[in-house]
Amino acid sequence: MSELMPVILALTILIGGVAGAAVLTWFERRLLGVWQDRYGPNRLGPFGIGQVAADMIKLLFKDDWVPPFADRMVFIFAPTAIVVAMMMGFAVVPFAPGMMIIDVNIGLLFFLGMTSLAVYSVLLGGLASNNKYALLGGLRSAAQMVSYEVFMGLSLIGVVMMSGSFSLVDIVEAQTDVWFCFSQILGLIVFIIAGIAESHRLPFDLPEAEHELTAGFHTEYGGMKFAMFMLGEYLGLMLISCMIVTLFFGGWHGPMLIGDWLPPFFWFSLKVFVVICFFVLLRAAIPRPRYDQLMSLGWKVMLPITLVNILVTGAVLLWIEGVA
Amino acid sequence: MLEIVLFYIAATVALVATVMAMTRANAIHALIYLIVSLLAVAVIFFLIGAPFAAALEIVIYAGAIMVLFVFVIMMLNLGEKGDKQERQWLQPSIWAGPAILSIVLLIELVMVISQTSGPVSVTAVSAKEVGLSLFGPYVLAVEIASMLLLAGLVGSFHLGRRYLDRDNLEKKGGQ
């Protein structure tokens, strides 16, 4: 059984990830509706959940077309890359004690590596479309994602220093008493902002930016290839939420004063759900910054914050070690 | 046994991808093969007991440096013309000489390796050990590398400044 566990879990993530992303498209629109004082899709089935099936049928039956001017091989490869990379990222997420595909001692770096590979999807999609709006979207995404990857990695150094390991299981276990969201509040803020930028969602969806670039890097995409891009984006959202919970909100542990009286997986999913709702709220509440504002926010605000965080965390850890 | 099989699969992928990267006329296709090659090398690093190096290979080489390569190629916007020129440069008369010479070197390398071959002992090197050796015996190399990077940073800042000033001037002129 224990040998089969990773295989079963991998299949569950594969199916659950796709289904979850599909339901999220509906859930997000309903939630946005609530926060923007309107209904959102509410016609099909109870609460409009039939919209998910309607969207799926529509996407599946659309003509799977490759523009004649596009670079065919790269055009088809691009949307698959983001889905594969994001799915691979789930391999190291600890859902509950023993409930993960693989516990490697470089789990955190593996996650960073997979998110950094997802950049290619947007980049190559924009390039292969051979369309100037798509190219501009791709260029923006390259600069945005490479920059925010830097802060994303640096913001996690504090967590690694405090837990003394890159293994995600060790990081969750180090938070048994106190979650890292208090001591690593600066790291958490930077990680959330960098996470939104990495999954290029509103307010940082400059690679798409429909007001100025029609649809950015996926202007030429339609049907299932477009659906793959959306699947990748929602998988990215779920992956980032899982990582925020794992790294800063105690993973499978219950809240501190309440204790662990519910199954670990329940706590984990509840927290991930709350984080996803928070991301949707951000999308509803904050307008998109200009491109140069995004870049200067990154290099002039986020980089100093992360460096100060690392310095202070290191100093405090050494001080505690000296006292003890 | 499984590790050896995996090693040879990854090594084959790396070799094939590298050859493809060199022979493609389209720069983007060549870069994708190069990325695949780097990923295969990362798998090899992981198999021979250097998980930290494997992760850094993906994060830094495949995930950051190659993105910048793609970025530059996007800016150049080569298109069909670039492909044609590249195909012209890839005539056998041009690459045959260097290829023969490097095959001679390859044969020598294989002979040297086959003479000294012994069982490669797999000892996993953790991130902590890498860090300790970087800031212990190799601290001088780290400092020199940091100076080099700082010089690059100052240089790119200097090159980019001109445009920044012009933008400011335009803004002031418009107000």
Image (cartoon, rainbow, N blue to C red):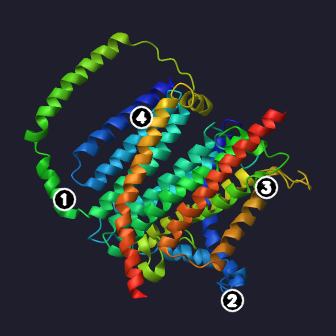
Q: Which chain carries label 4?
A: B
On residue A182, which mark appears?
A: 3
Residue reaching furthest to the top: B115
For label 2, count other residues whose C-alpha is less than 10 Å away and answer few (under 14), some (14-19) or many (20+).
Answer: few
On residue B82, which mark appears?
A: 1
| Vertical comparison of A226 with A164: above or below | below
Mark 3 or 1, which is nearer the eye? 3
Q: Which chain carries label 3?
A: A
Q: Is the Cβ of the residue at disc 1 closer than 8 Å to that at disc 2?
A: no
Q: Do labels 2 and 3 share a chain?
A: yes
Secondary structure beneath dot 1 equals helix
Side of A122 where A306 appears, left or right: right
Read off the residue under disc 4.
B10
| Vertical comparison of B175 with A6: above or below | below
Residue nearest the viewer, comparing A128 with A77? A128
Residue type pointed to by label 4: Ala
Residue nearest the viewer, comparing A165 with A263? A165
Considering the image in quadrants, where does the C terminus of chain B appear?
bottom left
Residue shown at 48% from the left, 63% from the top: A144
For label 1, count other residues whose C-alpha is less than 10 Å away and answer few (under 14), some (14-19) or many (20+).
Answer: some
Q: Which chain carries label 1?
A: B
For label 4, count other residues whose C-alpha is less than 10 Å away and answer few (under 14), some (14-19) or many (20+).
Answer: many
Secondary structure beneath dot 4 equals helix
Percent of width and height locating residue B168: 41, 76
Side of B10 where A46 appears, left or right: right
Residue type pointed to by label 2: Arg
Mark 4 or 1, which is nearer the eye? 1
| Vertical comparison of B101 with A92: above or below | above
Read off the residue under disc 2.
A38
Determine which quarter of the picture holds residue A21. Answer: bottom right
